[in-house]
Image (cartoon, rainbow, N blue to C red):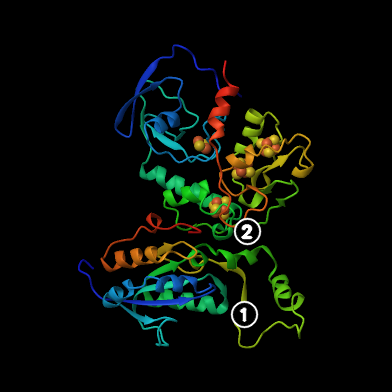
């Protein structure tokens, strides 16, 4: 990729707050320029419902906390040539991983029984089962680029995408850090 | 161990650091010479004004003719020394050390009182640590909030012993000590009793100010609010050790 070409991008959120995606949108008018250089082929931000067979760049926000997260992370790895962990939850587990210090049963009890006054019950239908340990994305699948930050700034996301578009390897530590 | 008093007529040596020819007093350490010449060396346990500890190993450098790495904070310069401070090997080792520090206890920068003002966090960024390759240990450590002004969160402690040294050498109270081995190792106040019950602590706050991380903080601080000020240290240290 020595000359700028239109690259395909897929994004999704796992156990995160969607803040990293909001930060992506915070690129404001640069989104217009970006739209000329990339095709968002799958994302909560667009309509398409299926991950295409091959995608140039995949962005994952959030950590792996449920069987559903794990499935999505694996699918992204299979379909994306370059996989990016976007934000602290994806990179290091961050706030979602703070439950790792307690037993999963205790966490469930605390959330759905102890603090509930009306019909306390643990939801089982229509929700994915939680994994015992919350992991960063690279705890389960190989990740190529890590963009820490909670959330990474719009500038940081812009920098990383732009470097990739220009065919360079980004150095995220030059623009962001854990907790940024 | 107090630093030896500066001798009136020490010799000057010449040495080479990263292909720069430099001269230094022979009683200086490598890190001191590097700091004087604006050659960056990452460090955590070293702090100007406290005695040498040599525990974190972040300051390691390569010295020609030595088949092992030397800690710049605890190695004195010598005539003709040839030193490399930033080789690929050193960068790799430093990254690994920092990753292990993050994996060992519990660091969630985004919700930490020291977010944005933390030496560990800053070093991670500077050394290119954008993720931790080893699994997190995820073992909880205690938090002691019994002191009316300060708090110690052992989850954020990297065992640099700056608190131990400043309290002993500068404040003269010697409230802090180190107890236990391996992953059980932690800093303690008095004889491992709650800090708030300490009879030796004068509540001067020096330990809080020199702690490089969010392990020692002021009570009542919220995310990112704990800003530390270490300016007092070199001044007080000089007065303490004045002949
Ligand atoms: S002590 Fe520093 S590295 Fe640890 S969580 Fe707080 S800001 Fe992050
Ligand atoms: S507040 Fe002062 S006296 Fe008390 S433990 Fe810290 S350095 Fe020592
Ligand atoms: S409490 Fe702070 S100063 Fe003391 S050893 Fe731990 S990290 Fe270092
Ligand atoms: S700064 Fe030299 S070993 Fe810590």
At x 54%, y 50%, the residue is: B100
Residue B153 is left or right of residue B242, and the answer is right
Work out how far the residue at label 1 is from the one at label 2, CA to CA, in angstroms: 21 Å
x then y, percent, for residue A28: 36, 72
| Quarter occupied by residue A21 | bottom left
A104 or B50: nearer the eye?
B50
Residue on which the image places disc 1: A129
At x 54%, y 28%, the residue is: B235
x then y, percent, for residue B25: 41, 20
At x 44%, y 34%, the residue is: B68
x then y, percent, for residue B143: 70, 52
Q: Secondary structure at mark 2?
A: loop
How many other residues sit within 10 Å of disc 2, few (<14), some (14-19) or many (≥20)?
A: some
How many other residues sit within 10 Å of disc 1, few (<14), some (14-19) or many (≥20)?
A: some
Q: Quadrant of the N terminus of chain A?
A: bottom left
- Residue B180 seen in the figure: no
Above or below residue A160? Residue B165 is above
Q: Chain of mark 1?
A: A
Residue B186 is left or right of residue B89, and the answer is right
B10 or B223: nearer the eye?
B223
x then y, percent, for residue B135: 55, 59
At x 40%, y 55%, the residue is: A173
Q: Chain of mark 2?
A: B
- The reply to whether callout 1 and callout 2 are in contact (CB within 8 Å) is no
Q: Assess mark 1: CB under 8 A from ligand 1?
A: no
Residue on which the image places disc 2: B138
Q: Secondary structure at mark 1?
A: loop
B185 or A163: nearer the eye?
A163
């Amino acid at each position: 990729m020595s000359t700028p070409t239109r690259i395909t991008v897929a994004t999704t959120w796992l156990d995160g707050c969607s803040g990293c995606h909001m930060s992506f949108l915070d690129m404001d008018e640069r989104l217009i320029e970006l739209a000329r250089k990339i095709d968002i082929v799958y994302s909560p931000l667009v309509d398409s419902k299926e991950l295409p067979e091959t995608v140039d760049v995949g962005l994952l926000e959030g950590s792996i906390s449920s069987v559903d997260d794990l499935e999505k992370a694996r699918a992204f790895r299979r379909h994306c040539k370059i996989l990016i962990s976007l934000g602290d939850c994806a990179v290091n587990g961050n706030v979602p991983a703070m439950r790792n210090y307690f037993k999963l049963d205790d966490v469930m009890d605390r959330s759905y029984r102890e603090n509930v006054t009306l019909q306390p019950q643990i939801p089982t239908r229509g929700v994915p089962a939680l994994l015992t340990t919350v992991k960063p994305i690279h705890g389960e699948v190989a990740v190529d680029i890590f963009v820490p930050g909670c959330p990474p700034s719009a500038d940081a996301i812009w920098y990383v995408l732009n470097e990739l578009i220009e065919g360079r390897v980004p150095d995220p530590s030059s623009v962001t850090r854990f907790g940024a | 161990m107090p630093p030896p008093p500066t001798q009136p007529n020490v010799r000057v040596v010449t040495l080479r650091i990263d292909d720069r020819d430099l001269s230094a007093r022979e009683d200086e350490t490598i890190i001191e010479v590097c700091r004087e010449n604006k050659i960056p060396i990452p460090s955590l346990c070293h702090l100007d004004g406290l005695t040498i500890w040599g525990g974190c190993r972040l300051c390691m450098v390569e010295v020609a003719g030595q088949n092992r790495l030397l800690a710049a904070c605890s190695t004195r310069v010598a005539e003709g020394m040839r030193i490399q401070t930033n080789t690929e090997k050193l960068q790799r080792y430093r990254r690994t050390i920092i990753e292990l520090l993050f994996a060992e206890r519990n660091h969630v920068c985004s919700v930490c009182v020291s977010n944005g003002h933390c030496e560990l966090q800053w070093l991670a960024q500077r050394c290119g640590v954008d993720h931790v390759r080893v699994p997190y240990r995820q073992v909880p450590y205690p938090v002691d909030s019994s002191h009316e002004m300060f708090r110690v969160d052992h989850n954020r402690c990297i065992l640099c012993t700056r608190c131990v040294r400043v309290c002993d050498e500068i404040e003269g109270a010697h409230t802090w000590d180190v107890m236990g081995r391996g992953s059980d190792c932690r800093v303690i106040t008095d004889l491992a009793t709650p800090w708030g019950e300490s009879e030796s602590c004068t509540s001067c706050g020096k330990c809080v100010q020199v702690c490089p991380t969010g392990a020692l903080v002021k009570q009542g601080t919220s995310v990112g609010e704990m800003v530390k000020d270490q300016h007092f240290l070199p001044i007080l240290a000089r007065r303490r050790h004045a002949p």
